[in-house]
Image (cartoon, rainbow, N blue to C red):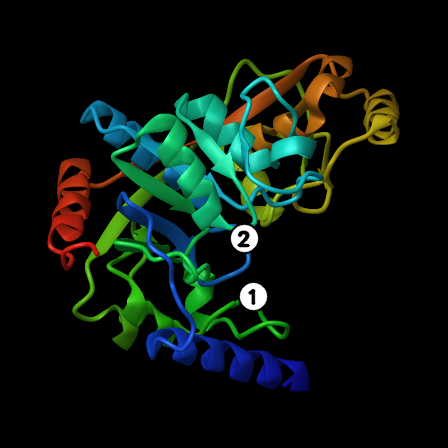
C-alpha cells in the first residue's frame, strides 16, 4: 500500500475525531442544512441528485438555495451565481445547478459565509449543501451520502478514490444507491437506503459523432452512449472540470474532418465549460443526465421529518 495512504487515513480519522468531540467547531446557520455528498472523489452523481432533490422541493413550494464551494472557479470569496455567467467565475457544477433549478446558488470557500449571504438576500426555508459530507465546519441537519458499486471495494486516497472510510457512513442520515445494486455491508445496516435510476437523455443526434467529455468517470458516459445504440466515431477524454479553449476546439474540428464524423456529442457539464466555444462545434448535441428517485414523496417526507426532529436550534 502507498505509505501516503496510511498518512491520509490517519489525518482523516484525527480530523473526524476532533469534530466528533467538539474540539473543532461546526457553525450553524439560521435555517436547516441538507447536505448531499459522497465518500469518493467525483462521479457519484451529486449534481444530478441535487437537481432532482431541488425539483422535489420546488414541487412542495419550499424555498431553498444551494451552497457550493465552486470547484474550479478562478474567483474568490462569496458570490451569487449568475445563470448567464461563466464557469470560470462560479464553477461548472454550480452554474449548471443554477440554470437547471432556477434557484439561488451561492459559492464560497466558507459555506457558512455563503449561507449567511443567502439568508440575508433570499430568506430560504432551507439550504442544500452541495458536496458537503466532508465540509464539517458547517453544521447540517440531514446528511445524504451517494455511493457507487465501486466505493464498496475501493481504498483510501491516494491508493484509491475514497476520501473517507466506509465506517464514516455512520454519520449519514440516508445512503443513496443505484437501482439494482445489491450490497450487504455492515455500514448500511439500520441505515435508510434510497434508490436512484440514472438515464441519459439524448437529443437529435448527428451521425457517427465524436463523443467527448471532461468528467470524473468518462467510461460510464461512453458506455451509456453505446448502450443507447450510438456508434461513436471517436471517444475523447479531457480531465474532470476541463476548461476548454480554442486549441481544444480546433483539435476536435480537425478530428471530425479526419474521421468524417457527423458532429459531436458531449455532456451538460462540458457544455457549460465550453461556453461560447460550443457554437463552433456544429452540430453539437448535449446529453442530459436524468435522475429519478424511488418513492420521492417518502424521501422528501423523511428529510423534513429528520430536520424537525433535530434538537431545538440555539
Image quadrant occupied by the N terminus: bottom right
Coordinates of residue 103 in the picture (x, y in percent): 39, 25
- The numbered mark, 1 or 2, whose residue comes first in the sequence reads 2
- 28, above or below 261, in the image: below
Residue 232 position by quadrant: top right
At 51% from the left and 51% from the top, the residue drawn is 110
Coordinates of residue 104 in the picture (x, y in percent): 42, 27
Q: Which circle marks residue 42 in the picture? A: 2
Mark 1 and mark 2 residues within 8 Å of each other at the beta carbon? yes
In the image, 148 versus 106, the foreground residue is 106
Coordinates of residue 210 in the picture (x, y in percent): 72, 28
Residue 184 position by quadrant: bottom left
Dot 1, crowdedness within 10 Å: few (<14), some or many (≥20)?
some
- Judged left or right of residue 84, residue 273 is right
Dot 2, crowdedness within 10 Å: few (<14), some or many (≥20)?
some
Coordinates of residue 149 in the picture (x, y in percent): 41, 60
At 69% from the left and 13% from the top, the residue drawn is 283
Which residue matches tag 1? Answer: 161
Q: Is residue 185 visible?
A: no
Q: Label 1 vs label 2: CA separation?
A: 8 Å
At 40% from the left and 46% from the top, the residue drawn is 129
Amino acid at each position: 500500500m502507498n505509505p501516503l495512504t496510511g498518512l491520509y487515513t490517519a489525518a482523516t480519522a484525527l480530523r473526524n475525531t476532533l469534530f466528533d468531540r467538539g474540539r473543532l467547531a461546526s457553525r450553524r446557520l439560521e435555517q436547516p442544512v441538507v447536505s448531499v455528498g459522497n465518500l469518493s472523489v467525483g462521479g457519484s452523481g451529486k449534481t444530478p441528485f441535487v437537481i432532482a432533490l431541488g425539483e422535489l422541493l420546488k414541487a412542495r413550494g419550499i424555498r431553498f438555495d444551494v451552497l457550493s464551494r465552486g470547484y474550479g472557479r478562478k474567483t474568490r470569496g462569496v458570490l451569487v451565481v449568475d445563470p448567464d455567467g461563466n464557469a470560470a467565475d462560479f464553477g461548472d457544477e454550480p452554474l449548471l445547478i443554477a440554470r437547471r433549478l432556477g434557484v439561488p446558488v451561492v459559492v464560497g470557500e466558507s459555506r457558512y459565509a455563503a449561507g449567511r449571504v443567502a439568508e440575508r438576500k433570499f430568506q430560504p426555508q432551507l439550504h442544500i449543501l452541495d458536496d458537503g459530507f466532508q465540509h464539517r465546519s458547517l453544521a447540517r441537519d440531514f446528511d445524504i451520502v451517494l455511493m457507487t458499486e465501486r466505493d464498496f471495494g475501493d481504498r483510501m486516497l491516494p491508493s484509491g478514490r475514497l476520501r473517507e472510510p466506509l465506517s464514516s457512513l455512520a454519520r449519514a442520515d440516508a445512503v443513496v444507491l443505484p437501482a439494482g445494486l445489491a450490497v450487504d455491508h455492515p455500514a448500511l445496516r439500520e441505515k435508510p437506503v434510497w434508490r436512484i435510476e440514472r438515464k441519459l437523455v439524448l437529443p437529435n443526434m448527428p451521425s457517427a459523432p465524436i463523443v467527448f467529455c471532461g468528467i470524473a468517470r468518462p467510461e460510464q458516459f461512453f458506455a451509456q452512449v453505446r448502450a443507447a445504440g450510438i456508434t461513436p466515431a471517436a471517444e475523447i477524454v479531457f480531465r474532470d472540470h476541463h476548461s476548454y479553449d480554442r486549441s481544444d476546439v480546433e483539435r476536435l474540428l480537425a478530428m471530425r474532418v479526419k474521421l468524417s464524423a457527423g458532429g459531436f456529442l458531449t455532456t451538460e457539464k462540458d457544455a457549460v465549460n465550453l461556453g461560447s466555444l460550443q457554437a463552433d462545434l456544429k452540430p453539437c448535441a448535449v446529453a442530459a443526465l436524468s435522475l429519478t428517485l424511488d418513492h420521492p414523496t417518502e424521501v422528501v417526507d423523511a428529510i423534513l421529518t429528520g430536520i424537525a426532529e433535530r434538537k431545538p436550534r440555539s
